[in-house]
Every structure is written in structure tokens, then in C-alpha cells.
Image (spheres, grey):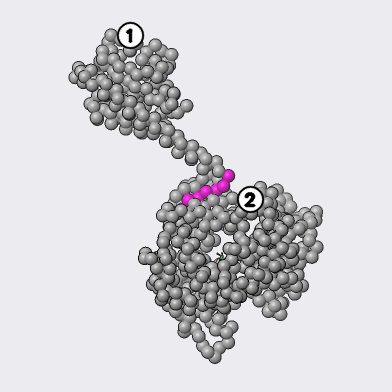
Amino acid sequence: MLELSTIRETVIQVANAITAAIGIESEIVDAHLKIIGGTGRYIKKIGSYEEDGNLDSPYIYSEILRSGREYVCMDVTGDKAYSPLEEELAEIACPIQVEAQVIGIIGLVAFTKEQQSKMEENHESLLNFLRRMSELIASKLIESQSSSKLAVLLESMPEGLLAVDLEGVIFACNFTSETLLRKKRQQLMGTSICDLFSSKELHPGLLKEYREKELIYEDGKKKRRLMFTIVPIPEIGTMLLFQDFEDVAVNAGNIANIQNQTTFDDIFGVSREMRKVKERALQVAESNSTVLITGESGTGKELFARAIHAQSSRRENVFIAINCAAIPDALLESELFGYEKGAFTGADKNGRPGKFELANHGTLFLDEIGDMPLHMQVKLLRALQSRVIERIGGSTPLEIDVRIVAATNKNLEEMIERNEFREDLYFRLNVIPLHIPPLRDRPEDIEPMLRNSLNRFNRIIGKQITGFDEEAVEALKGYHWPGNVRELENAVEYAVNMEQGHKIQLSNLPDRIRSKKNERLIEPKATLKEQTERAQRLIIMECLKTTGMSREGKQRAAAVLGISESSLYRKMKELGIESDQSVRC
Ligand SMILES: Nc1ncnc2c1ncn2[C@@H]1O[C@H](COP(=O)(O)OP(=O)(O)OP(=O)(O)O)[C@@H](O)[C@H]1O
């Protein structure tokens, strides 16, 4: 039953509007004969019942509710069906109907002779007016019911939902988001997304459209893996939908969503080098052999790993990625192999599958393999050799059928010499090596990639920028792109946001590209390696000077440079930039 009381405010406003327009008192009752709104003498009676709330009474209002008929009486004293208060002289009443259902009544009541004659003279037009008002109330009720139905739908969605504005501030959330993030609605609403998630991908300006990406949510000491789908909504903000990662993999029965897989067509590159890498990757994709992808951060290693999976016979099963650098050493083993119930304090009481199990019959992408601690390298090698794993605290060996694709931006051969990486594991992984060259070594790719990114961000941000002006192209082509394609994408996104005209101007490029710092880095006598390291050191220091050395500062610096936070920490270590060192260039 549609209840008028759910739009009480509207009902009161309509009653006031009627009286203001025609100078006669009005009352509005619901389907239980309860007075919901009224003017004049009826204000005091709001909340009480007409005809004692008896729906079977022989009087007018109960009769209107039963029959749906209108009532017009210019002298109520002679009407037996009327039970007047002493002063009531005349009444016009009109049912409020939604389809065939009567959900209330609007009554117009004359208490003075003057009002009575006004009613008599204009009863046709007054009745018409009441019909319009009754339609208005009915449509408001339907509208409010459908928006509350929508609210019920959003609340009962199995996915968490957060809606953020252009500044990244949460303005809507649902019940599942409270459960998954272990926070109350009041704590979520009005909070910046940056305060909830450290992953830079979720920060405003860096939010990009993507489906099903695994990101980590940290709540105090607890970490939770969530699978995100991000939908930018131009001019409004972004909608984030997320699920518990394990639920997704288990519910999917380890069946992949093949429609949204990254394929080789998504890998862009016109240079000879890129065409060669793509050809080679395509050749080996079909086989089950282990692939080791090397290349600097942001060159597209994960993109290649996904395309290989999509091209293989495993494409209908899952692709699971694990970033060995992002997971604390103590957790890496349970992340990879899972654990049985009661395996250790704080463990989930039902036990949990590891990535190997989740990726069964699919592909397991071991990202940043060079950052895997030595003791874990031994365990990984054992699993790869025997193709059998055991959960922590378990005693049943599980056979696994997983294709391994590993990636690193480190020089594993140098690490082997320094005893930081096991040679036997290296040979086990390096069955099919694929090296992706950095962007600066394939300059022909820069311009087409800029155009490609421009089209994409025009679409996402809703702009129609036609290209780059000459000076901007020159700066972009001359830049050394330490963050490779990721940095290029971020630079174009920044420029598209900033640009108000039809072409991207030099002034709208990020500072580090505009200021052509790379020119003063060149020292003809130094080796290429020395010059590259020096350049990287200067760039990172310069960036940290702006963002600061706090944890958040470093997160921002990583985002600006287009590298992962863990890559930034690693680079700082390699280049001798200390965390608490004052930033000088
Ligand atoms: N050849 C390419 N064509 C299209 N997009 C690319 C290409 N290479 C990289 N990208 C884009 O650049 C970004 C970084 O790519 P990806 O994450 O695969 O790099 P990565 O080498 O794995 O980085 P990291 O070592 O930091 O994890 C992604 O948005 C990806 O889509």
C-alpha cells in the first residue's frame, strides 16, 4: 500500500498552497482516515482521525475511500452522511488515486457564509483544482517510492559502492561498502578517498576507467584485497564498485571474464623494437612455458602478461596477479600458498586459499619477482618444480596446474652475482625471456602513444582537444620518460584536464617535462648508466622536494612519477636517497 505519510512534507505544502490560492481551509487524510496535512482549524487536528478511523462507517470520507467518488455538498447540515463539526457549512472532497487505488482524500471546507457562497459559485473550477492537486500528490508519492526502491536496490547490492566527486570526496555509499571497509556510513561520507586508500590508482586525477583490478585496503593492521571496477562520470566524479577479491575468484569458479581481457591489440607500439617483442610474445603465448618479462617500470610488463594469458588456451580460466614487492615478507607465503584453519594467530578461522590455488588452470603473474625474499624463492622453486603446493598448517598436498609469467625491472643476473637471487629459480623462470625496451629507446612510439592517450582521455574527461601544439610535442619528444608509458599516460591526463583550448600547449604540461631539465643532465664523459642514474636521482629528488618526505608525500611523488610506491622506495634505495635526508639536488 502506498502511504501518504511517507511524503508528509509535500502533503502539508499542498494543503497550504490550496488555502493560499483560494482562501478556503483544506485537509488531507490518508487511506486510514488519518489527517496528514491541513490548514486553519485542521492544523491542530493533524495526526488525529476523521470518522474515528472507522473505514466501515456510513460517513462521507469512508464512503469516498471505498467508492473513489468525489463529493460536493453546498449545505452539509441537511446531509445525513455528513457528520459535521458545529461550524462546517459546505465541503468539496476529491479522492487521491494511484491507478485504481484510493490512497487519500483532499477536502475543501467552508466555515463562513462568504466561503460557502464562493464554493457555490465556483464549485466546478474548485473541483477541477482539487483534481490537479490530487494528481500532483499521487505523482510525488510514486516518484518518492521509486527513488526509495532504487535506494533499496543500491543497499542490497552484493558489491560495495562508493561515489566520489571530482575532488575525490565520498558523497554516496551503500551497506556492502560499510561491511567491506569495516566503517560506518558516517565515517565514509564526506571523507576523501585518499584517506581511505593508499593505492594511488584511487586518488583523484589518477582515477581511470578499469574493470576488476585488485587493490589493497588497509584497516589498521589488517589488509584486505578488493577487486575494483572504476567508472568515471564526467562533470560529476567517479563511481567505485568493489568486491572481496577471494569472493570474486571463488564465485567465478575460477572462470575468467573473457570479454574484458587485455589482448595484444591493446598493446600499442609502431617501433621495430615493440613489433619484435609483440611477435615473440604472440609466438609463445599458446604454450604452457614459463615466461620472464623484464623491463623498466611502466613499460607494460603486466599488459604483456595479460595479453599472453588471453592468447593462451587458459584464457577461459583466471589470470591472477601478485605483486611480490607490495606484500610484507611475513605475509607472502600465506598469500602464495594459503593456510589451513588455525594455522596461526589472527588467521581467518576457515582457512584461506593462496594465489596458486586461486589461479589453478589459469595463469599466475608474479610481478616484481626480483623483490621476493630468498627464503621464499626456495619455496617458490619447490612449488614450480613439483607442481604441488601445501597450505600453511596443512598436510594435504594439492596438485596445481598453473602457468607462470613473472616480471621484474631488476637485473636478475647482477642480483645472482650478489647472491640476492637464486640462480636455480632464475633458470626455472627464464624459460622464455621477453625484454620490453624503455620508451626513450623507441622514440617513434612516443607520438602515436600521445595521440592514443589523448583520444582516450578526451573520451573519459569529455573534452575535444584535437592535438598538441608544436612546442608541446617538442618537449614531450625530448623528455626521457623515466616512468615510461605510465608516466606518458599520466602526463596526457594532466594536460587534458588543464587545457582549456583545442590544442595542448607547452604551458599545460607537467612542470618536469616543461622545464627541460634533461638538457642539463647530459655529461658527455659519463657512461650511459651513470647519466641515467644521475638523471633519475635528480628527478626523484626534485619531485620529493615538492611533495615532501612523509609517507603521503612519497605516495604523491610515486603517483606524479608514474611508478608504484614500492618502485619508488626501491629506486630511492638504489640511488642512495635516504628517506629522512633533506632534499637537495
Ligand atoms: N605498449 C603499450 N600500449 C598501451 N598501453 C601501455 C603500453 N605499455 C604500457 N602501457 C600502459 O602503461 C601503464 C603501465 O603498464 P604496466 O602496469 O603493464 O607496466 P609495468 O611494466 O608492469 O609497470 P610496473 O613495473 O611499475 O609494475 C598501464 O596503464 C598500461 O596500460
Residue furthest out toward the left: 114
Q: Quadrant of residue 100?
A: top left
- Dominant SS type (magenta): strand
Nearer-N-terminus badge (2/1): 1
- Closer to the camera in the image, 194 or 96: 96
In the displayed structure, 548 sits above or below 527; it is above
Q: Which residues are magenta?
A: 158-165
Residue labelled with disc 1:
80
Can residue 55 be seen from the camera position used here?
yes
State the separation of the CA atoms marked 2 and 1: 69 Å
Residue at 72%, 50% in the rendered image: 341
Q: Is mark 2 within 8 Å of ligand 1?
A: no
> Which picture quadrant has residue 143?
top left
Q: Which residue is mark 2?
A: 248
Q: Is residue 345 visible?
A: no
Q: Amino acid at mark 1?
A: Lys
**Residue 59 appears left or right of 122:** right
Q: Secondary structure at mark 2?
A: helix
Quick one: SS at disc 1? loop
- In reply to whether residue 345 is colored magenta, the answer given is no
Q: Amino acid at mark 2?
A: Val
Instruction: Rate crowding at label 2 as few (under 14), some (14 to 19) or many (20 or more) other CA atoms within 10 Å.
Output: some
Measured as percent of width and height from the top left, residue 423 is found at: 75, 74
| Residue 9: % across, % down | 36, 33
Q: Vertical placement of 423 versus 67: above or below?
A: below
Q: Quadrant of ligand 1?
A: bottom right
> In which quarter of the view is residue 272 placed?
bottom right
Q: Residue at x 44, y 74 (%)?
A: 473
Q: Bin the neighbour count of mark 1 within 10 Å (Cα to Cα): few under 14, some 14-19, many 20 and up.
A: few
Q: Is residue 462 shown left or right of residue 574?
A: left
Q: Which residue is found at the position 30% from the left and 14% from the top?
A: 84
